[in-house]
Image (tube, grey):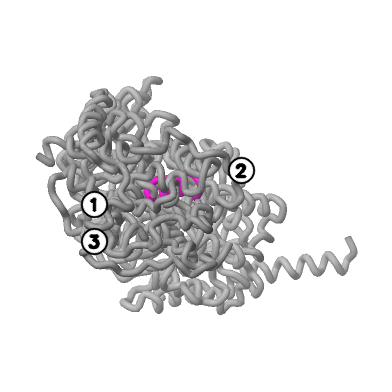
Amino acid sequence: MKRRDFLKVAVGSCLLGGIYPEAFAQAQSVVALAEGQDYGAITRNVVSALGGMQRFVKPGNTVVVKPNIGWDRKPEYAANTHPLVVKAIVEECVKAGAKRVKVFDIPCNDPRRCYENSGIQAILKGLKNVEMKHVERERFKNIKINGSFLKEWELYDEALSADVLINVPIAKHHGLTRLTLGLKNMMGIMGGNRGYIHRNMEDALADLNQTVRSRLTIIDATRILLDHGPQGGSLKDVKVLNRVIASTDIVAADAYATTFFGLNPQDISTTVSAHKRGLGEMNLSKIKLIKA
Amino acid sequence: MKITSSRISQLIFLAIFIILFANTEYRGKDEISAAINSFFRANPLVTISYIFAAKAATILLIPGFMMILASAILGRFFCGWICPLGTIIDLITGTIRKSAPLKFLKGRFKYYLLFTLLAAALFNVNIAGVFDPIAILVRALTFFLYPLLGYTVRNGWAGLYSALGEKRDYLDPLFAFLRDYVLPFRETFYPLAFLSLIFFMGILFLERYEKRNWCKNLCPLGTLLGILGGLSLFKRIPGKLCADCGKCKDICPTGFDTDTLQKSDCILCMDCELQCAFKRVAFPFKGVSSIKRDKGGSAQPVMGRRVFLGSIVSGFFLSRVFAFQSPVQHERLLRPPGVKDEKDFLKKCVRCGECMKVCLRSALYPDYFKAGLYGVFMPVIIPRLGYCEYNCNLCGQVCPTGAIPNLSLEKKKKSVIGTAVLDKNHCLPYAKKINCIVCEEHCPIPEKAIRFEVVEEKDHNGKLVVLKRPYIVEQLCNGCGICENKCPLEGKSAIEVFAQGKRATNA
């Protein structure tokens, strides 16, 4: 290596460190929180509190935005990510220069009904450089995971090949894991017999999130589902919070969202397991909170 | 092939039929406005067999009555101007070389067939739909040809992916139209695909013997329309082949087996009128008074006491001869939502395949044994393959006779298909002391018909584990089958829907 090249790399990595502080693991985890009734605005606020979308999305990037569209339920039932939250994120990505923004999920109910009833398909219709397609079976790739529970699994190619993956879960109750948040929302890129991982959800989700890292986690807590999750179906179980949080640390985001339910991060085994694996910070006192 | 008015009409109706078929599908709206069921609702065979079997009528059958009236006035125009199966036969028959007509199909065979089916309906077993031409066509399409199209195109598309990888996305706009408007949403394989194909191909095969062989010698709908057409106020003249020409015998697809036109077989294609070199042929309005006078000319051995009595006996036999049913099979006889009574369903179901075509999650399949042989082609839910989607009531919307009632969504959600039953020998938390409860997660009932209890137990290695063990709240379970469908065990599900509970709840 010539001296000039060495300097380039050295200066480059210093700059990179400035732009991506958490690339150096010691940096403190930051969670941005915004509250308000304009869901588009609070979503934009948490993103700009973290440095704006241009920090994550570079011109020409292909971005995958992965909401929870798992259920055939209308937005008010708090089973899927709110369409306004998804739309604001997608628009910010396009504004930051994304070549293409792909929005999809692999739902539990009929995919057509979920896309329709979630309100997300309708709200994204006509947006330029944005696509929302149903998954195509041939696009699953068998990926070696070599985790403690998952050895290999079929994952969706678009999530694997995207330049930036933005994870947009909704905060809600779940029978098995008590809550489903960012870590669990990543399950939506898995194919195959997904029910299998219920046997050891903690390790499976840590394995998955170790293999596929989301650049940014934005948790929709505009309304949360308190019981009978993850699909609910009764408005009695829904609580309107008008909040959105965001973090580049998926565990920190999950840990903070847990408090909305009156629970501690330690109560959620998936969070604990991911923290132990070094996927992020769960200790609330070590997480910096920015109110946006 | 000449372009005549009847041919244009045939092609238009075939196009309508195909468009309606492709639109008998969920396309983002909870209501389906256009479904092929109009072809069944305006179908006199469906109308009359329903009335015979159910001993009642429904408002849904009004188009059928109108068709009966129209045929009695105009004649058997349906076969020559509308029937999509007839049109398909006309389109291909020119390419098939003919040998001599089959003798055994001549005479009264078709009348025996029609009246036997109607008599069986009278004895509460309505299997007319098995031989209904529109139903034969829809079943062949739904169970075999349409899935075949989807399989072929999609595999080609998948093949492009293995060649191009993600670059295939550039071609996506070209594929989008096919995917969104033409192809089935998912790959489904149907039992009885082969039988549906045999019926359809058999009808085409019959064209080896003579033109419109099925239509004029077998089709129970055509035979029924022919009887009605015998009353028609229009009559072709001349009534016989002209001694100096006789070309009508070659031109006519159905009516000139002998030198005298059989009015009940004339499908009013009017090719003879167009092609007559001497301009002798016409179809003038004769009025009511003509009916009696004409009797001598065009009458043939139609009904007669023999056919009538013979059919009653064979219909009675037919209604009992396949009566064997296995009670064990009945346990899993899961009918579409809203069907309350098996006997009633047997009277009203046309076996047209529409509910199976429209079923969002491919939950409905043609039955072949569960309800005995009488149940052939009738819809059953096979939950391990597809479950009944909680917010969907499309099957009731497309059913032409209301055999599957068109329930409001609220009522449909509460109508009981069956009840889920746990098999603790297979279910992980019970059998292996491993957590799972995928079934509980998927249960769509807002209060959850599947719940769990938390217990602390020693697992088989002696380690203390906290287990969530599912149980079923039978009063809430509607038997939709999503639990059975999603159970992550391989092969057999640890939770299965049984037809039990139905009797008690729906009584």
Q: Are marks 2 and 1 in contact (CB under 8 Å)?
A: no
The answer to whether residue A189 is above or below residue A10 is above
Question: Is residue A111 shown above or below B327?
Answer: below
Secondary structure of the residue carrying tag 3 is: helix
Residue drawn at 36 percent across, 55 percent down: A71
Crowd rating for badge 3 (residues with CA inside 10 Å; few <14, some 14–19, many 20+): some
Q: Main secondary structure of the magenta part?
A: helix
Residue topped by disc 3: B69
Q: Nearer the viewer, mark 2 or mark 3?
A: 3
- Tell me the magenta residue range: B134-146
Q: Amino acid at mark 3?
A: Leu
State the image coordinates of residue B7 (x, y, percent, origin top left). Answer: 49, 64
* Distance Cα–Cα, label 2 vs label 3: 63 Å
Instruction: Provide the residue designation for mark 2.
Output: A142
Q: Secondary structure at mark 2?
A: strand
The C terminus of chain B appears in which quarter of the rendering? Answer: top left
Residue mark closest to the camera, 1 vs 3: 3
Residue, x 18% and y 48% (percent of image)?
B51
Residue, x 31% and y 26% (percent of image)? Answer: B430
Q: Give me the C-alpha separation between circle 2 and circle 1.
A: 54 Å
